[in-house]
Each structure stands twice: as C-alpha cells, then as structure tokens.
Image (spheres, helix red, strand yellow):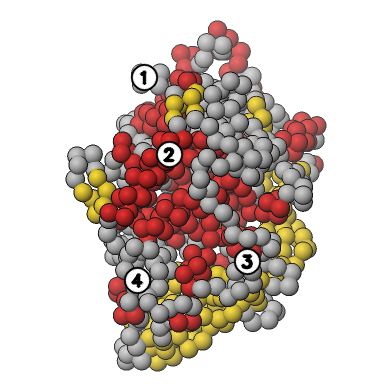
Amino acid sequence: MADKNNLLLLFDHPTEPVFMDKGKKVTVFDVPDSFLTDRYRPISNEVQSRVGDKVEQRVPVREISIPDLRIPMSLGRDEQFSLFLPKHRRIAGRLIDIFMNMRSVDDLQSVAVYARDRVNPVLFNYALSVALLHRPDTQGLDLPSFSQTFPDRFIDSQVIRKMREESFVVQPGSRMPITIPRDYTASDLDPEHRLWYFREDLGVNLHHWHWHLVYPFEAADRSIVAKDRRGELFYYMHQQVIARYNAERFSNNLARVLPFNNLRDPIAEGYFPKMDSLVASRAWPPRFESTRLSDLNREADQLNVEIGDLERWRDRIYEAIHQGFVMDERGNRVPLDEATGIDTLGNMVESSILSPNRVLYGDLHNNGHTFISYAHDPTSKHLESFGVMGDVSTAMRDPVFYKWHSYIDRIFQEHKIRLPAYTENQLNYSGVSIEGIQVDTNGGRPNNLTTFWQQSDVDMSRGFDFLPRGNVFARFTHLQHLPFTYTISVNNSSGAQRFGYVRIFIAPKNDERGQPMLMREQRSMMIELDKFVTALNPGPNTIRRRSTESSVTIPFERTFRNLDANRPAAGTPEELEFNFCGCGWPNHMLVPKGLPEGLPCVLFIMVSNYENDRVDQQLVGRCSDAASYCGVRDRLYPDRQSMGFPFDRLPRTGVDRLVNFLTPNMSIVDVNIRHENRTVQRQN
C-alpha cells in the first residue's frame, strides 16, 4: 500500500524529471522503465542511479495500465495554463477526472508519476491538488503553497536570478535571504503604484489561487464544483476584495476604483509585471496605458469571441435580474429569490458548470479576464501568451482586476438592491442589547489600530529546478498590524441563557471628499473582520475576542504552508485544523493600512439571534476558522443568513446614515487606523 504522503513529493521541482530526488529527506521514485519519457528510457539505468549514496528513501511505483492522457497532453509542457480559457478548463477537467477515478492511492501514485513528465507542470499541479483535496483517501494531506512550487508567479525575475546564484554558490547553512524590492513594478509617478503592497502581496495572491483551487468551476465530477452556496461565495469573496481595495485606496488618498463598465473604452492603467514564467521560459507580457480590448481570434487557444458577445451576455443577465428569474436550458423559469437568487446569479456570472444556461447567459466573468489578458495580442500575431489577468495566481497584481471586479460586483448589486430591505424585526434580537464596545492594542490608546511594514522570509526551494538542494529564502515586505482585542459589553434581559452570532465589520467614515458617507454607499465598503458564536448568560456579559481568532483570516504559517515546521502533534485536533487546504485571507492583511494621521473608520458590531442563523452540523476538525470567505470543507456554509448580512441589501426607508440603521443589538464606535512608516523583521 502506497503512503499517500509521497504524493506530495510530486509537487517538488516541477520541471525536473520525476526520477530525480525530492524532499528534505532525500527521496526517489523507482520508476518503471516504461514510465520514462522517450528521452530517458534508453539510458534508464544511468539516470535513475545518478543520486547514488545520498538516497534516504525509495518509493516503489507499480506498473499499471495508464488511462488515455491524450487530452491532458494536448497542452504543451512549455505553454502557459489558464483556468479562464475554456479549452484549458476542459483539459484540466479531464485530468482531474482521471486522478479522481483511480481506485486506490497506489494506482493514483502510478498514474500521477507517469503523467508528471508528460503534461504541463502547472496543469499537473492544479489537477493533482484538486484531486487530493476531494478524494476521500487523500483529504488529510497538506498541499504545499503554490508560491513554493512556482515562485516565478509571485516574485521579480531579478530576485529569481539572485536566488539561483545563492543556491548554486553558497552551501545551505550559509545562504542569505534575497530581498524582493518594494518598488520594482513601477515608480511613484504612477498613482496606482501606491497600492503595490496590496496587489502584489504574496498572501493575497495565494488566497485567490487557493480559493479557486477549493472552488473549481469545471470538473467531470459535478460534486467537486457543486459545493454549498458556491455561487454566492464567488460573489461575496470578490465583493469583499473590492471593499478592502477601496479602503486601501482611501489609505493612500485615492478615490474608489472606477468600474470597467464600457468594454469599448481604453483601459487607462498599464501594468508591467517584471516576471518570467519558468515553465514557458517567457516574460509575462505587459499592458500599455490606454490599451483597448479587441475581438479575440486565437486559433491555437480555440478562442473566437467578440466584444459584442460579452455585451449580449451582460444585457441578458441584467434582463434576468430585472425580470426576477432566469431561463434554464429547458425553458423553465428559475426565480432569483431572496434565498437562492444570489447563488444562481453567482454561478451564472462566473460561469461555472452550475450555470443554469451557459448558452443564453454565456461566460462573462471568465471571458472578461481573457479579453483583458490578451489585449496586447488578440489575434496571436506575435505568438504572445496571456498577461497576468489570465491566471488566478497573478490576476490580483494588475490594477484592472479591481476595475473588472467592481463591474462584476455592480451586476450583483443590481440584484441585491431589488430585494426587500431587512425590517427592524429581522435585524433585532429581542432582549439583547450591546452596551459598549472597545478595541485595544497592547499599550495603545483605546479604539486606535496601528499598521506598519514587516519583512518575512519564505522558503522557495521546492520550485527551483536543476539546482543544488537546500533552503532558498525570499524576503518580502508586507503590511502588518499590531494585534488587538475586542471587548463587547452585552446585556441579556431575557432571564435565560441564549446564544448570539457576533458579526464585526469596519468601514471608512468619510468618502473621497472627506464628507460623511451615506448608508447606501457605506454598506458596500463594509469589510467583514470576524463572525463567531457566543453564549449569553442572563444579565451583563463581557465578550473578549482577539484579532488573531478572525473567521476571515488564516495565520502566516498556514498562508505560506511551511509543512516542515510549526506542525502540531500527530493525531491532535490541532493537526486536523492544520491539514485544511490553506484557504483564507492572510492575517497580516486583516485591516487596511490607514494614514499617518489616522484613517477615520467606524467599527460595527451586531449580535444576531443564533437560533435564526445556525446551521446544524459537526465542524470538529474541519478547519472552519476561515469560513467567512472560504466556507467549510465538505460542509454547509456555517451561517443561514445571506453572506454580508446585514449590509447585503439597501437599508429600510428613512435610514440615511449608519447610526439610524442600528437596533439595540447593534453598536458602533469610531476607530482610527494609523500607519507608522517603519519596517520590522519578522521573528520566526
């Protein structure tokens, strides 16, 4: 019986032949000669014995009959792979299907070893990751961080060169981290570059990659895609990204991002990624300022789509929203109601295989990414591949990502504003009132949050191929904040113990002009910080909650998935938590950067009636600690209310300001976020 943990070694050194040594414990796969590629089969003894005496572990690979891999192999080993391209999605779906259908871990190991040197490395990583996350016999495995196996997606090409030199010349114990410059994609002449720390943050981009790994939009096995409230989660996660991005813009004296709502207008912002693809051996193409989209006619990618197609799909989606229903493939009406409408719409806009009618409503979101990513070479005249908008691990680096998703969110809001406003009865929790709120950092003034810069080291050695082994660290600068604690005073006058769902949001107080925001616009700026269940004893209650416990974020160690360190003891509940997929917003980006003089914000806390919100299910060991944006693996979303409640709809009549929105079980407090322009070194 094969050890399922050995499957993780197949992620190491993705472009090296499978028979080369892998892992911290020097391990080789004993590959049958028939599994070797044509280049190495004639010299199998020579190449398979090259590691020699260093081998600490050998993994036997059983020779089996290999499924038909012609479709996965139709994508070249040195091509770029994109989940946004329909052709590539079909190829990935086929490979996922092959991996999922292997009867045992032994058979999966054999076919994965065979496929690894024959299919595109990024495609292989994606398909095997999805399979390991969803197969019952491999669900406990810790997938390595994508940044470790494909560092070229996350860091500057010059840094990659310096890391190669360091690993080749210097012995492992003496190697120094290579620092990623803070300003390598643009200068301060570009106002958008003020947001470099958000758009180019490793953890933010890893979150986006991992979310799409957990929620793939195409697979032969429908259950892999058809997770609870999947379409709604697509809407909400991206809506929160835009709310966060706009708060960061306010933190840099910039106005909110403008939606890219006219597809025939030029894209004002350019982006020059300064990165190379190690798989394709090509530079990621830039996009110049004022580039216009063009109809796509790229035969090799099986792409022949017009801007008019996007406009027709958009108009049909708007028509469905205004009519209150969509038409499925059989001509039946599917209502866009309060309960499931946003979920249907999310699946339709994205569009996943769960779309009620792909022929009618098309593929708006994914094709938007594709059109933008090919704007520099829409007909393949120059044989250029897609830009960073074409890949889920790099798309958030580009300023246009936020313009496009602001537009996508505008479509969702068109549906949300048509739903009836929550009534006071729906919002209130009779007998429960919040008497006071305070936020404290260690030694800081109450209701003041502090951010600063931090430098952290990440080991990228698993992704460096054809080089001496040992750790190779990149040092990157990222936003960080002082940890803080909420203290919430709640009174329960009911005379019996009750349970409440505590919901915590933060938003800027003022708009771009410094004017107090109206509730209608402030609700879309509300950033969810935390959500948790608490017991309320009769009488006064004091609830304390640490920022590190947030239901939105995962800690640094889980974001960057160092599987060899910080590992809980085997068999403990903590290890089960550790073993989740790594999906979650990075904790170091929990709060916006703020301003040196302070960014005035309002902190909103609500205690809703848990009896109305609860979803009865067992969550032990299911790593539900980042459920707000990621859901819970193999379980229902742990909140019956709409995602973003109570701010997902327009307020009731007469409520112009947030203060007028409050019921006794809600409270607000002014909070200032101050940024200190200092840099500290992370202590591991």
What is the secondary structure assignment of the residue under circle 1?
A: loop
What amino acid does circle 4 point to?
Answer: Ala
**N-terminal-most mark, 4 or 1:** 1
Q: Position of residue 304 (x, y in %)?
A: 44, 26
What amino acid does circle 1 point to?
Answer: Asp
What residue is shown at x 32% (from left), y 90% (from top)? 494
What residue is shown at x 61% (from left), y 47% (from top)? 399
**N-terminal-most mark, 2 or 4:** 2
What amino acid does circle 2 point to?
Answer: Leu
Q: Which mark is residue 280?
A: none
Q: Which residue is mark 4?
A: 421
**N-terminal-most mark, 3 or 2:** 2
What is the secondary structure assignment of the residue under circle 4?
A: loop
User: Front-most of 407 and 173?
Assistant: 407
Residue neighbourhood size for the residue with mark 4, other residues' Cα within 10 Å, grouped as few (<14), some (14–19), many (≥20) = some
C-alpha distance separating marks 4 and 3? 27 Å
Q: Which residue is mark 3?
A: 512
Which one is closest to the eye, mark 4 or mark 1? Answer: 4
User: Front-most of 42 and 636?
Assistant: 636
Q: Position of residue 213 (x, y in %)?
A: 46, 43
Q: Which residue is mark 2?
A: 310
What amino acid does circle 3 point to?
Answer: Glu
Q: Which mark is residue 68?
A: 1
